[in-house]
Amino acid sequence: MSYRCSTLPGMAWTRALLAALAVCVLLLTGSAGCGTGGADEQKNGGDAPSPVGEVLNDTDGEGRHYREVDDKEAPDVGIEVQPDTDDSWRVRLALQDFRFSPAGAKEAVAGRGIVRLFVDGHLVARLRTPEYRLSARYVPHGTHHVTARLYADDGTVWAVDGEPVESTADITASGSSGPSGSSAPSALSGPERAGTTNDALSAPGPGLRTEGRGSPDRGGKAS
């Protein structure tokens, strides 16, 4: 009897220790489970950005697909082109609900991207600022169409009602003596002045001119 009574306190202590260890294991297992669930949720796209608009089958002259967005949420652009010194032209953009993205951005984000500048449908520059100096070599004698078109950072074209978001100005060059005549500026105002660099091209590339949202009519007035 004395032996059994002497071992009871030790047995109680052992059981208490085992119970405490079991509680610790359950807590650790539960925490790990919660952490794993959160990681799985993030891996499955729980924190992934929502898609922007709808990518259409239609493309621009370079084969870049249109990204359709609602008119109320769409960005917009206006363009003004005026003669400058050294036979060049001053291009100024008026942007609405649109911001230039930093170099290296790859995902389509609402209201962000770059502007591609075309002369008679030929790509001459990729812009990250609202101002650009257009060389006279892109504008020989005659009348030309200068178009600013908005692109998302994944290369798709911002579009509304199946038409690219763009604006076009008509300019007339007199020839080797320099630019003359007047341009047809768009009517947008209040550009967001963002970005610091332009990615100008050394020579125009192939492309097709497409009139769309913000393009002027044949009378030279911007819509």
Image (spheres, rainbow, N blue to C red):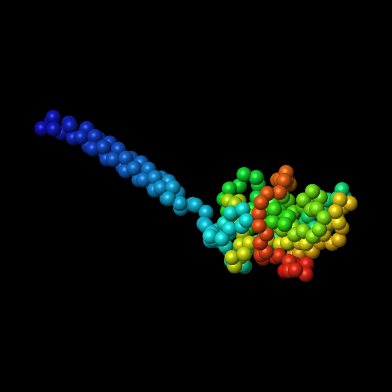
Q: Residue furthest right?
A: 177
Q: Where is residue 148 in the image (x, y as percent from the top left)?
A: 71, 57
For the residue pair 173 and 46, the one nearer the viewer reads as 173
Give residue 135's position: percent from left, percent from top: 80, 49
Which residue is at a point 71% across and 62% down the rendered structure image?
Answer: 167
> Image quadrant of residue 52?
bottom right
Furthest residue toward left:
1
Report x, y in % for residue 166.
Answer: 68, 61
Question: Residue 144's image quarter?
Answer: bottom right
Residue 66, quarter of the rendered image: bottom right
- Give the side of residue 181 with respect to residue 65, left or right: right
In percent of the image, x 66 and y 65: which residue is there?
A: 212
In the image shown, does 38 or 48 lie closer to the viewer? 48
Q: In the displayed structure, would residue 2 be above or below residue 167?
A: above
Which residue lies at the image location 36% right of the left edge and 45% below the top edge?
Answer: 33
Quarter of the image where the C terminus is located: bottom right
Q: Residue at x 61, y 47 (%)?
A: 105
**Residue 27 vertical position relative to residue 215 in the rendered view, above or below:** above
- Can residue 191 be seen at all in this image of the molecule? no
Left or right of residue 42, residue 213 in this image? right
